[in-house]
Structure formats: C-alpha cells, structure tokens
Image (cartoon, grey):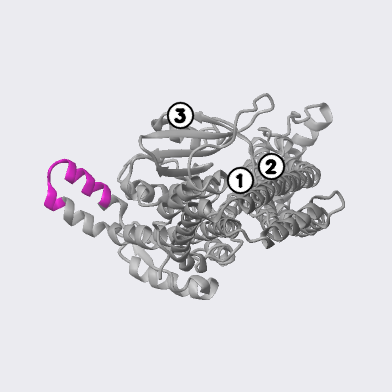
C-alpha cells in the first residue's frame, strides 16, 4: 500500500488517545509530528546558468509576471524562496550584526541551516532591491542579506510546493554554484533550467555530474521554446550530453516551455478572451510541468515525510500499548508485575549512575563524528584552496571583485555542508543511544550553530586602499616607455633611410610609448588586483581554519550536552512512571477483583483501540527507514 498522506489525521487521533490515557508527553509528541508533516512542502530548487530564464519561469509558474526581478537575473545575489501563505508577504533574512541578537529564521520551507539571523519585513515590490546587486556598482544594496522569502496564497504552492530561485551571479562556475550544491542536500527535487539557444555548457554538465551525488529527483525545463526554432535539436543534444556526463539523470523528464506565451495567456484571460487564453496556455507547455510538480514531486515528498511520521506514530503507540499492558497486568493482580517493575527500575537506576556506560558511549560516538567532520573539512579546504588559486591566477581588475564574492560564497557552502553533516550525525547518535536506554523521544536538536561571525562580517577588503605611488622615480619609470618608443622609431627610420620630419618622429615615438605605457599600466593594475584578492582569500582561509573548526567543536559540544540532558530527563520521567506503576500494582493487590472489573474493561478497550491504530500505521512504518528524518 502507498504511504497515506492522511497520516497527520492519524497522528492527531493517537494524540487524543494519549490525552485520554493520561500520557501528556506521548500525546504532545504525536501532535507535534502531525503539525510538522502537514506543514512541510516539497522543496524544489530551481537551478541554471545566468540568463537562462529561471526567474521568468517561476513568475510564469505562479502566474505573477514581475514577481521576481527578471531584468536583474544576471545579478541575483541571494536565494529567493517562494512558499504558500494565507496572504502576500515578503521578508529578507539578514546576517545578524554584532550589535543585534534577534531570533532565528522564520517562515516555512528551506533555509540555510545554522546561522543566526534577523528577519526584516519588506514590501513585495522591493524584492529586487534586496535580492539583486546594484547594476551600477555591482555591490549589494542591503549588505548582509542572505535570503529573501516570499509568501503567496497560490494554488500551486498550496499543493505542497516551495520554489527556491538560486543566485544568478556567475552562474554555475562560481562560488554560488557551491551554495546551490549545498542547498540540494535539503531539497526534495531539482528543477534544472536551460534554454533553446544552445547545448549544455561544460560547467552545466560538471554541475549535473556532482548533483547526482546529492539528489535523485530532477526535472529539466527548456525555456524560450517560442524564441528558438531549433530547440528540438538542442533538446536531443542535451539528452545525449546528460547520458554521458550525468547518467543518473538520463531518464529525467524534459519540459519545453514558453514563459512569454503563459504571460500573454494571462493577459488574454484578464481581457476576457477565453479562447485566445486557452490556446496560448496550451502552447506555453506549462501544464505538464505543473502536473509533474504537484502529482509527482510534491506527492513523493509527502509520502516520504508521511512514512517518517508513521514511524514516529508507531513508537508512540508502542509506549502507550506497553503502559496499558502493564496496567492490565496490574488490574489482574499479578504479583509478578511488582517484581518485573522493580527489575526495570534497577536497570534504569544503573543507567542513571554517574559511572554508567551510556555517557561514555555518547562521548565516543561524538568523537568519531568529530573525526568524520574533520576529514570532510580537510578535504573541502584542500579543494577550496585549489579553486582559489585558479581563480586568482585568472583574476584581473574587472573580475577581482567577483572572485572575492565567489570565494565568500564557497566558504558559506562549506559551512552549510559541515553543519548539515554535524546535525544529521548528532541526530543519528541521539536516536541510537536513546533507543538502547528506552529513552525514545530524545531526537529534537535545537542547539544554535551559527555561521562564524568573524567570517560573516560585511566588508569588501580585497581592494587595495593604497594610492599608486607618484614620486619622481615612479614618474620617470612611468614615462620612460615614451623615450623607448621614440628611440625605437628613430632606429627604424635610420635603418630604412627614410626622411621623416623631427616632429613626426617625436609624435610617432610618443604614440608608441603611450601604447607601451598603457599596456604596462594595465598589467600592473591586474597584478595589483590579483595580489589584493589573493591577500583577501588567504586572510579568509587562515581565519576559516580557526573559526570553522571552533564553530564545529562548539556546535558538537552543545548538541552532545543537549542530547545528554534530554536522555537524563527522559530517564527521570521514566523512573517516575515506573514508580507510579509499582504503587498502582501494590494498591490493586489490596482491592477486590469486582471493584477493579470496570477498570479492566476500560483497559481492554484501550488496548483494542491501540491495536487498531497500530495496524493502520504498520504498513506506513514499513515504508520509512528507521532513523531517517525529514
């Protein structure tokens, strides 16, 4: 049987049973999981080289022309997430400044993990101002913005979809490609956007080859099908390239679309021309894409999350059932129950002793996690160093600023990968240790692990602030090429025996010297730019070697303490439950069987009800691998 998307209702029923049986903790766990699985949407990351029409595609999908900045697509600087909301709203998620300590991220859906932030409400028509670079200066108009989030009452989004538009700066060959790759770890599907102008580039193929390691669900969109007559030939060539470079995606579906036709169809419908609108809508090609997003991607993500929620439901039901079975045994006045409960308390008390084995197990597992993260860090830093050296070698005055921004993005992507691996590893440790101790439920990790503030500070230090030297030696050095040019011209004239007036000779020599001087000036400027950006990158790398590892260690320590405290609290609560069960069993031994009969009947009824709920969730639980999380 397929995983039932109605699992939130089942969890709500389990929570109601928990309340009726007096187990508020189990009821709350079921209720929390029900709310989480109902609220989550499938995260669809929209990826593509610059000027491929990503923003236009999202605008067309949402039937909102002008929602995302189309003209500024080449300079989109941050992720833009569009999610379902009851009313239109937009926020900018900004790095937390040194003097600001506001709460963390808000809103539903994907967010870069771990970095504390402040959330600023912005008008919907100001999205471009916060999401794109200033076309005149090339800098962010609002430094520190990490993500822009837009909430809309849109039917496509309400079907269970969240669209994430990735940065367009530098396309898939820049540091933003690393940030996009990191985002795929938290995505449910990839929507890869190309257009009909030509075949996939080498950088696009390389990105897709790496993406196969991160995500399995992908769909390809070929935009501007109305603009390029040869788009079918391009599509066939692209299929061949993907089969060669990213064979894991060879069977993925392709969707040729025209955002212009969709936009024109919207205008025709608004003008009352229903027939024209229907024809244009069909030609736009968006309907098959929307069906795939809602029926395949959203439904599949819902199934996975429902399966995980069903696993949680089964664990809650197992505890409720065990408690009712013990109560049934107590009401049956079984003297062996007290002995069994006493033995359970003894084992629990052994686990609660200061010299118990589980804290050592927890410490050992976190040390192993630390080794794994350190290996990941070392490997990524070596790769990052090599990438930086290539970028610096090719840098010049026109590209140095972009290289600096891209390297900052690479560092953030590295941290995203490290933080995600740390959190997932800690979650697995928590569940293993808790399961061994019977402390199931200790799986909520709320420790804040922010991006290191020293690396997050907004600055543009790559530019050299020292003015070019202008002393006498430098002036002579700068104008000497003119004399050399004059000498070269004079030698050529003398060798050829030409009669050229002195003024002409001087002019020709000066022109040649000016050209040499300009070339030398450009070479020196490029060298200064490379030196500046190299100094900036090396400074960040040296700082990262300290800050990132320190942040990892602090994060793991916080998570380990949180898990330990959670297990201790759960064991203390379990001790209270066992003490209450023992006291109840002793009391039942002193009462008559006739007095206990109504309670026995109520307990039997509760067990039958729990058995029915367990049967309904058994198949759902089988669909989710234990220990996974959504």
Q: Please give the name of the residue rendered at 48% of the width and 43% of the height, measured from the top-left corner.
A: 108
Q: Please say whether residue 457 is one of the residues in the magenta stretch.
A: no
The residue lying furthest to the top in this view is: 99
| Residue nearer the viewer, 426 or 346 | 346
Asked if marks 1 and 3 touch (Cβ < 8 Å), the reply is no
- Image disc number at residue 9: none
**Can you tell which quarter of the image residue 139 is in?**
top right
Give the label, 1 or 3, closer to the camera: 1
Q: Name the residue under label 3.
A: 122
Asked if marks 1 and 2 touch (Cβ < 8 Å), the reply is yes
- Image disc number at residue 113: 1
248 lies left or right of 95? left
Asked if marks 2 and 3 touch (Cβ < 8 Å), the reply is no
Answer few, some or many: residues within 10 Å of disc 3's Cα (few below 14, many 20 plus, some between 14 and 19).
some
Q: Is the magenta stretch mostly helix, strand or loop?
A: helix
Q: Position of residue 67 (x, y in %)?
A: 37, 39
514 lies left or right of 552? left
Q: Position of residue 421 (x, y in %)?
A: 67, 55
| Residue nearer the viewer, 244 or 495 | 244
Q: Position of residue 583 (x, y in %)?
A: 67, 48
Answer few, some or many: residues within 10 Å of disc 2's Cα (few below 14, many 20 plus, some between 14 and 19).
many
Quadrant into which the C terminus falls: bottom right
The answer, for residue 271, to whether it is visible in the render is: yes
Q: Give the range drawn in magenta.
A: 262-276
Q: Please give the name of the residue rendered at 37% of the width and 61% of the height, measured from the top-left corner.
A: 196
The answer, for residue 395, to whether it is visible in the render is: no
Q: In this view, does 200 lie above or below 183?
A: below
């Amino acid at each position: 049987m397929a995983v039932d998307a109605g699992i939130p209702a089942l969890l709500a029923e389990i929570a109601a049973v928990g309340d009726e049986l007096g187990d508020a903790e189990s009821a709350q766990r079921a209720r929390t999981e029900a709310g989480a699985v109902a609220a989550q949407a499938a995260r669809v990351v929209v990826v593509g080289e610059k000027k491929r029409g990503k923003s236009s595609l999202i605008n067309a999908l949402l039937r909102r022309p002008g929602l995302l900045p189309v003209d500024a697509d080449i300079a989109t600087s941050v992720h833009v997430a569009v999610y379902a909301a009851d009313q239109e709203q937009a926020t900018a998620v900004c790095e937390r400044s040194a003097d600001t300590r506001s709460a963390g991220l808000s809103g539903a859906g994907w967010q870069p993990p771990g970095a504390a932030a402040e959330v600023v409400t912005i008008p919907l028509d100001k999205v471009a101002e916060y999401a794109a670079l200033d076309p005149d200066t090339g800098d962010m108009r609002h430094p520190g913005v990490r993500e822009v989030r837009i909430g809309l009452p849109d039917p496509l989004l309400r079907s269970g979809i969240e669209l994430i538009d990735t940065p367009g700066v530098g396309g898939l060959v820049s540091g933003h490609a690393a940030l996009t790759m990191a985002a795929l770890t938290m995505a449910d599907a990839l929507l890869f956007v190309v257009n009909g102008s030509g075949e996939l580039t080498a950088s696009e193929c390389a990105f897709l080859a790496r993406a196969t390691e991160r995500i399995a669900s992908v769909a390809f969109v070929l935009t501007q099908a109305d603009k390029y007559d040869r788009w079918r030939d391009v599509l066939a060539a692209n299929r061949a390239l993907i089969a060669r470079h990213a064979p894991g995606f060879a069977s993925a579906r392709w969707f040729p679309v025209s955002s212009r036709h969709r936009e024109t169809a919207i205008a025709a419908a608004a003008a009352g021309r229903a027939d024209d609108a229907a024809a244009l809508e069909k030609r736009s090609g968006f309907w098959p894409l929307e069906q795939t997003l809602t029926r395949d991607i959203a439904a599949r993500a819902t199934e996975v999350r429902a399966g995980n929620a069903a696993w949680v439901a089964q664990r809650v039901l197992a505890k409720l059932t065990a408690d009712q079975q013990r109560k049934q045994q107590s009401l049956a006045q079984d003297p062996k129950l007290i002995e069994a409960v006493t033995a359970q308390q003894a084992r629990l008390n052994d686990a609660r002793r200061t010299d118990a084995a589980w804290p050592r197990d927890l410490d050992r597992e976190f040390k192993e996690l630390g080794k794994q993260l350190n290996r990941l860090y070392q490997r990524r830093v070596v790769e990052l160093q090599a990438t930086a050296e290539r970028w610096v070698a090719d840098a010049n005055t026109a590209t140095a600023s972009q290289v600096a921004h891209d390297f900052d993005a690479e560092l953030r992507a590295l941290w995203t990968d490290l933080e995600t691996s740390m959190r997932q590893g800690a979650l697995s440790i928590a569940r293993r240790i808790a399961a061994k101790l019977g402390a199931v439920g200790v799986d909520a990790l709320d420790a804040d692990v922010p991006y290191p503030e020293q690396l997050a500070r907004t600055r543009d230090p790559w530019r050299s602030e020292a003015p070019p030297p202008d002393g006498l030696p430098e002036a002579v050095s700068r104008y000497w090429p003119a004399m050399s040019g004059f000498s070269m011209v004079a030698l050529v004239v003398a060798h050829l025996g030409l009669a050229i007036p002195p003024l002409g000779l001087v002019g020709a020599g000066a022109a040649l010297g000016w050209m040499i001087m300009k070339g030398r000036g450009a070479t020196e400027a490029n060298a200064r730019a490379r030196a500046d950006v190299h100094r900036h990158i090396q400074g960040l790398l040296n700082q990262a070697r300290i800050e990132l590892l320190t942040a990892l260690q602090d994060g793991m320590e916080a998570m380990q303490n949180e898990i330990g405290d959670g297990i201790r609290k759960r064991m203390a609560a379990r001790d209270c439950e066992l003490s209450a069960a023992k006291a109840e069993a002793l009391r039942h031994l002193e009462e008559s069987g006739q007095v206990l009969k109504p309670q026995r009947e109520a307990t039997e009824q509760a067990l039958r009800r729990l058995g029915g709920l367990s049967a309904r969730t058994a198949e759902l639980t089988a669909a989710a691998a234990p220990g996974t999380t959504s």
